[in-house]
Amino acid sequence: MSTLGIDHLGLTVSDLAGSRAFFVDCLGWTEFGGNPDYPSAYVTDGHAKLTLWQQRGATGFDRHEAVGLHHTALKVADRATLDQLFAQVRDWPGVAVEFAPEPSGKGPKVHFMIREPGGTRLEFSYDPR
């Protein structure tokens, strides 16, 4: 192998302040940088690193029509954490719930899908395997 996994994932968001607040204030991630001249915020949960970039120009996202990001999937340690996290994020300002926790396919993986305030489609999942 010539690569070692993903260093970070860069996401273009329609509301940088809203996305930053969602990851830092709602999910408890840590901000570790950014660039005010090229508006961005860099956040981490201690494992994954995301760079959030303020969108300019066109708005909206269509996972069926655009090349690139379909969604970002984040894993959690257990089912109780998944359910607690859903209860925490479902009413966060600007969050749109696509579906509540349910089996992924025939299971045993369980997941839910939302759009965070900046428009990124996020999946949260627990897989007991």
Image: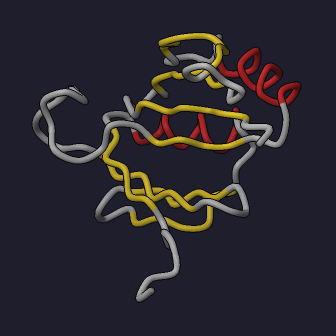
Q: Quadrant of the N terminus?
A: bottom left
Q: Residue at x 69, y 62 (%)?
A: 47
Q: Above or below — where is 114 with respect to 42?
A: above
Q: Above or below — where is 84 with respect to 38?
A: above
Q: Quadrant of residue 67?
A: top left
- Colouring mode (rainbow / by chain / secondary structure / one colour): secondary structure
Q: Residue at x 11, y 34 (%)?
A: 58
Q: Residue furthest bottom?
A: 2
Q: Residue at x 59, y 37 (%)?
A: 21
Residue 104 in view in this figure = yes
Total tally of numbered discs in the picture? 0
Left or right: residue 15 versus residue 105 is left
Q: Nearer the viewer, residue 30 or 87?
A: 87
Q: Quadrant of residue 59?
A: top left
Left or right: residue 43 versus residue 87 is left
Q: Position of residue 87 (x, y in %)?
A: 76, 15
Q: Position of residue 37 (x, y in %)?
A: 30, 65
Q: Position of residue 129 (x, y in %)?
A: 77, 43
Q: Nearer the viewer, residue 110 or 84?
A: 110
Q: Residue furthest right?
A: 80
Q: Above or below — where is 45 with respect to 124?
A: below
Q: Residue at x 19, y 27 (%)?
A: 64
Q: Position of residue 127 (x, y in %)?
A: 72, 37
Residue 61 in view in this figure = no
